[in-house]
Image: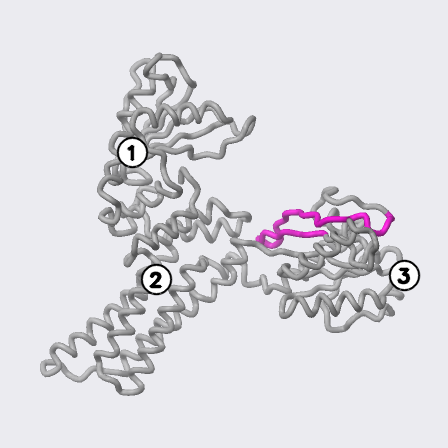
Amino acid sequence: MDGSSAPAQASLLPPIAQGETIAAIATAIAPQQGSVGIVRLSGATAVAIARALFYAPGQQPWESHRILYGYVRDPRSQQAVDEALLLLMLAPRSYTREDVVEFHCHGGLMAVQQVLQLCLGQGARLAEPGEFTLRAFLNGRLDLTQAEGVTDLVAAQSTLAAKTALAGVQGKLAQPIRQLRSTCLDVLAEVEAHIDFEDDLPPLDEVVVRQQIDAVLSDVDRILATAESGELLRTGLKVAIVGRPNVGKSSLLNAWSRCDRAIVTDLPGTTRDVVESQLVVGGIPIQVLDTAGIRDASDPVEQMGIARSRQVAQGADLVLLTIDATAGWTAADNVLYESVREDQGHRPLILVVNKVDLVLAEALAHLNLPTNLPTVHTAAAQQQGIDALEAAILNAIHADKLTPGNLEFTVNQRQEAALTQARNALHQVQETIENQLPLDFWTIDLRTAIAALGSITGDEVTESMLDEIFSRFCIGK
């Protein structure tokens, strides 16, 4: 994590911020949770603060990329606050390319909080969200795609999400974006040369220019095609289990999550509120919501649960309409189906026929089920059919695209918007060429495309953009 991948842009930092040393707790803190807590400092006085607070017995050398053992002491009372390790990473071989110091303390609440307060007492300032990574960007350590990859990696909920985030950290998205921008810059330079030196140069080859723009557009479309997959990996899929009371929705949730998340009884209406479980299926984080059975009910509490069930179904990315195989497809099921289908629009709907273990195999063929729905047979109480259910869900969302071989990296919403802007501008260049407009008109849209591509990597950036991006980071990263 010491390499260079972006131009230094320290001038964007306010002058006072460039000389400040920042400090923050870099690990999650909770009582009786975590064996180690880290307090991180970055800036010109980081080492001086560490020397003021840390006592390293013996002849341990204070050298870069060394770990020292000792005690954190309050400089006023000389009382030990914690037994700890100290890690030194001197500029430029650090995450921020500034002097970085980390106190590796005992976990929990008190030790790291006390060490952080001592650091602030020595003149450090509490870091803003994402400020360590912001400094890494401004000092040329990372580009914006790598910085956003860092926060995606921290938030990853599946191995595939972590893999694509790591690809961003490694610069695998930045590389093609920079190549596309370089091609556009070459085209712009050639067009501007023909504007300025028209009499000294042969006519501009419009065919070659259009071929170059076509090639860029093809690559932009290819990168844009990863946006939907990226959003799915980052935010996951919300799946609602809906159906009449006592069709086995809670049993299905329990079997799927392999734990007793929901109460299961033979009494209709047992589930009064939405019960949630978090799963990972095919590399995709899935939030499964077991809803109250939908029926006409007189109980006010059950009525509230049913109302919430309808809201959950409307907001879900995919609905599992569950029916009881022993009852077959009833009029109530049909009413519910029509209601869900109307609310779902184009979102996937899968029919789950539960309790198939209680009916004869030949009877399943005569349930009068809708023929236009993907259908899965389950026996949730026996934990049967779960694999088939997961396969149907992955097929419904076309998850075959979400494989390591097909998905090297993904773009986020900000990057998607910038790529779309670049694509529109390049299409406009093509239209300008086709309409035989003067070369000056070509340059307008070329510059727009170049600026949009540059905003993805941070080659062209504004302070407001940085504020918007790094405000989403956690403090300490």
Q: Name the residue under label 1.
A: 21
Q: Name the residue under label 3.
A: 360
Nearest to viewer (mark 3 / mark 2): 2
Q: Where is residue 279 in the image (x, y as percent from the top left)?
A: 63, 49
Of mark 3 and mark 1, the one earlier in the sequence is 1
Outermost residue on the left side: it is: 200
Q: How dense is the environment of label 2, judged by Cα within 10 Å: few (below 14), some, or many (20 and up)?
A: many
The stretch of residues the image draws in magenta is 266-290
Q: Is residue 403 left or right of residue 461?
A: right
Determine whether the residue tagged by mark 1 lies in a helix, strand or loop.
Answer: loop
Q: What residue type is labelled 2?
A: Ile
- Residue 67 visible (yes or no): no
Q: In this view, does 402 lie to the left or right of 419?
A: right
Looking at the picture, tell me which residue is in the foreground, 273 or 87.
Answer: 273
Q: Quadrant of residue 214?
A: bottom left
Q: How far apart are marks 3 and 2 (CA)?
A: 59 Å
- Residue 137 visible (yes or no): yes
Q: Name the residue under label 2.
A: 177
Determine whether the residue tagged by mark 2 lies in a helix, strand or loop.
Answer: helix
* 275 drawn magenta: yes
